[in-house]
Amino acid sequence: MSRQAGRGTESKKMNSELFTLTYGALVTQLCKDYENDEDVNKQLDKMGYNIGVRLIEDFLARSNVGRCHDFRETADVIAKIAFKMYLGITPSITNWSPGGDEFSLILENNPLVDFVELPDNHSSLIYSNLLCGVLRGALEMVSQGLSSSETEIRTTKVQMAVDVKFVQDTLKGDSVTEIRMKFIRRIEDNLPAGEE
Amino acid sequence: SRELFVLTYGALVAQLCKDYEKDEDVNICLDRMGYGIGVRLIDDFLARSAVKKCRSYSETADMIAQVAFKMYLGVTASVRCTSAAGNEFSLILDKNPLVDFVEELPAERASLCYCNLLCGVIRGALEMVHLPAEVTFLQDRLKGDAVTEIGITFLRKAEDRKHKRN
């Protein structure tokens, strides 16, 4: 397999090779476990979801972002902060729907596929589908503590149901990798911490 | 930051636990996967670290513990030589990021070497630089030991070295 040359400055800070290869081992194992690509895709999405619901806490703690007021802000945070933090890349945001509830993330470089070619018998495999699940799970579990006084802490849960899918994939011969994110609905609860 | 990697690793181990009933089979599988990773990762390591060739097993062990661990896991390990022949070493990890989200092993998985991928990685990488070795976990905090300790035994007889071993 050919090695990509010139990964640029991001490679100094984010040594993702071990992650990339471990992710490959995971996908390979799933391909052994499930006969068809669709089942592997579903399993990757499910695993990603379970990762996302945990990862969001880590993200909020590390990034210290304030609450996003609309889906555009959310898109910015995902692309410029979250992707940067965990994958060392910054996708661009494009193709907003007229209603502002759908957008695309364009990844020119996807570190997960650094060593990867899809074999012919896995042409329907969505190799990086874990990412879709991570995004979906994280957005469903976004919650931030806001202190309103010394004695009372209110927790705002901003649960957002989104649909996330790959619409272009360099592994399948497309020129870029494109993830489409669509906002479905939002649930907001204001609860004193003790009631949770 | 490595949390996405750590959680993905957890997903991998969980999947293997579904696939294999016995801990020993999961351990073997993790080691084998790690080996497959190590034989590729060594190229990346040598390119990034630009290290010169190690002149002794002791230097090699130090390189793994101080440079490679730092590069890929963000932590360093301390090294001790544990044999008079100078070919056995122990790497002690104070902090192991792979287990950040793991509180304890489930009761039914008491023999699981959760991080066994690492042993395979080290073994595979060393083999690619012509230093065949056995690599195993000797102690594991997840199993209640005080520290996490990886043992490396270099298998080839130590060649004549110009420099004295430490």
Image: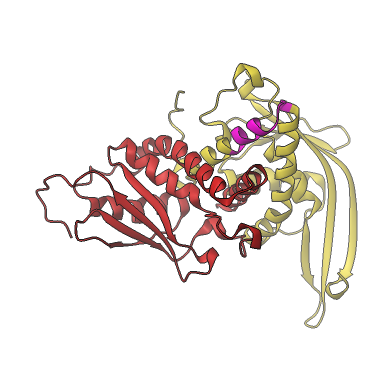
Chain colours: A yellow, B red
Figure check: B115 above or below A168: below
Q: Is residue A141 left or right of residue B122?
A: right
Q: Residue at x 62, y 65 (%)?
A: B103
Q: How far across and how far down the image is residue B147, in percent?
A: 45, 68
Image quadrant in which the C terminus of chain A is located: bottom right
Figure check: A157 above or below B126: below
Q: Residue at x 32, y 45 (%)?
A: B133
Q: Hey, which quadrant is residue A167 in on the image? A: top right
Magenta segment boundaries in residue numbering: A26-37
Q: Residue at x 53, y 65 (%)?
A: B143
Query: Mainly helix, strand or loop, the magenta region?
Result: helix
Q: How far across and how far down the image is residue A150, in percent?
A: 77, 82
Q: Is residue A32 magenta?
A: yes
Q: Residue at x 70, y 44 (%)?
A: A48
Which residue is situated farthest in the left direction here? B162
Which residue is situated farthest in the bottom direction here? A151
Q: Is residue A163 visible?
A: yes
